[in-house]
Image (cartoon, rainbow, N blue to C red):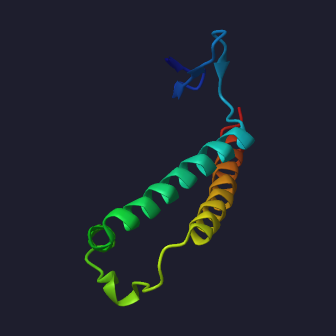
């Protein structure tokens, strides 16, 4: 819902189940949400490399503005331990990023 604050600016209010307005973001919840998102993206990326390695390299090359990633392509087979290592690492980075984002949002959104 959009409402006008006393200063006249538009404030977006999130509605909770009970109908209460919320203007703070739970930093731990945001961290967990981003961690899970990063973990799922990492798993999907590993799956894409297993199913279509050349297409995945081509996609990420296009994603990187045409950078040729074939020169840095690993010849080692994809192993479950390495995939889990990446999933856990990205989850930790995602948690930190989500936590810092929410903490910063709450800091600059004080009223």
In this rendering, would 106 be left or right of 15?
right
Query: 77 or 28, which lies in front?
Result: 77
In this rendering, would 101 be left or right of 2?
right
Residue 47 image offset from top left, x and y in percent: 42, 59
Query: 46 or 106, which lies in front?
Result: 46
Residue 70 image offset from top left, x and y in percent: 32, 85
Is 38 above or below relative to 24?
A: below
Q: How many marks?
A: 0
Q: Residue at x 54, y 27 (%)?
A: 11
Q: Residue at x 40, y 87 (%)?
A: 72
Is 13 above or below relative to 41?
A: above
Q: Is residue 108 visible?
A: no
Q: Quadrant of residue 15?
A: top right
Q: Is residue 90 visible?
A: yes
Residue 63 image offset from top left, x and y in percent: 31, 67
Query: 75 or 39, which lies in front?
Result: 75
> Of all residues shown, which one is farthest toward the top?
18
Q: Residue at x 51, y 59 (%)?
A: 42
Q: Residue at x 29, y 83 (%)?
A: 68
Is 80 above or below relative to 21?
A: below
> Of all residues shown, which one is farthest toward the bottom?
71
Q: In the rendered image, which quarter contains the C terminus? A: top right
Residue 105 image offset from top left, x and y in percent: 64, 44
């Amino acid at each position: 819902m959009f409402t006008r604050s006393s200063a006249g600016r538009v404030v977006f209010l999130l509605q909770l189940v009970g109908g209460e307005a919320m203007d703070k973001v739970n930093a731990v919840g945001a961290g967990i949400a981003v961690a899970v998102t990063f973990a799922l993206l990492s798993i999907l990326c590993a799956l894409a490399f297993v199913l279509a390695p050349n297409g995945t390299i081509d996609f990420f090359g296009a994603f990187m503005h045409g950078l040729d990633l074939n020169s840095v392509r690993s010849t080692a087979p994809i192993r479950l331990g390495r995939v889990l290592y990446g999933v856990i690492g990205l989850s930790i980075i995602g948690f930190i990023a989500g936590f810092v984002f929410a903490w910063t949002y709450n800091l600059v959104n004080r009223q």
